[in-house]
Image (spheres, grey):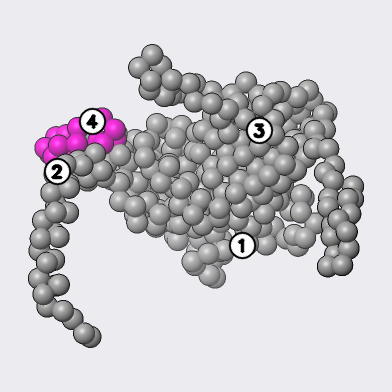
Amino acid sequence: MATDIRLKETLPQLTDRIVQSYTELGAISHLGHCPLPNYETVISVTEALKEVLFPGYRRREGLHLGNVTYYVGDLIETLHDRLTLQIARALCHESGRNHRCDAQQREDFEAMGQARAIAFLERLPELRQILATDAEAAYAGDPACKSIDEVIFCYPGFEAITVYRLAHLLHQLEVPLIPRMMTEWAHTRTGIDIHPGAKIGKYFFTDHGTGVVIGETCEIGQWVKIYQGVTLGALSFPKDSNGNLVRGAKRHPTIEDRVVIYANATILGGHTVIGHDSVIGSSVWLTESVEPHTTVTMEKPKLRIRGANDDLVGRK
């Protein structure tokens, strides 16, 4: 390897400049504080949770009713310990007490972390029932699907809704940071962006899914089917008298039961309600409510097609 030693000798000065920026730009540094939740651990926990939810599909083969209790019991015990620590770290950060905690403070946060970890794990049987409805909706809603097994193995929409539902439970328990870490990880894997604060009913199906965005204050009923590229977003971002964004208000639409939303439709606004049993066509832009049993479509566009030796021809 050809190396110019004179250039390499500048690296200590570069290091000093980078370290100096840690002081100048402290808002994007986390030094000298209690540890934050560990990203790799949170993702590992998420993968282990999927193993609990769908036994026999992922890491461990050969499971049966004779040995599954031991396997899941070991997973649950490990999840308890890891979740307790990661939730405690998130709670410490959220409290604003980022300085190094003494032994008593660590115990206090870990006690809170344990309580929320147990409350979360207690909800897993119920969550499996809900996810079974999502798998059923995917199978019922896609004629290309051959089995529930195919949904669990192959469908990015099912992967995204699984991680969302896990994260939503933590969000309901007021666990900071970790739910967003989970759903943004799922976003990178699937292209589907679901905020953990959204409320999504049973039998939810995202077909194909790439580019779907579901905002924090969305409320979605049962048997809702969404295609790729759909945005359920905010119409605007109101600000207070100081120019700061107003947080906590409902900014995203409500989608009632048995609604189908086709590809690349955009529905915006906290006061926008899509009535039950409605169909929203592709590329529709909606910022107002529609009544139940409504079909909303774009007018058929006019195509212009021209061959190499032809005049421009308009077609409808």
Query: Which residue of the protein is positioned furthest toward the top in this rendering?
Result: 241
Q: Nearer the viewer, mark 4 or mark 3?
A: 3
Answer with mark 3 or mark 1, whichever residue precedes in sequence: 1
Give yes or no for contact between labels 3 and 1 (Cβ–Cβ under 8 Å).
no
Circle 4 — which element?
Answer: loop
Answer with mark 4 or mark 2, whichever residue precedes in sequence: 2
Q: Which residue is mark 3?
A: 267
Disc 2 versus disc 1: distance between alpha carbons?
47 Å
Q: Which residue is mark 4?
A: 96
What segment is highlighted magenta in the picture?
A: 91-106
Kind of residue sitting beneath label 1: Phe
Q: Is residue 53 magenta?
A: no
Circle 2 — which element?
Answer: helix
Using the rendered view, name the quadrant where residue 177 is placed: top left
Kind of residue sitting beneath label 3: Ile
Task: Say above or below: 45 vs 174.
Answer: below
Which numbered tag is attached to residue 23? 2
Answer with mark 2 or mark 1, whichever residue precedes in sequence: 2
Q: Which residue is mark 1?
A: 153
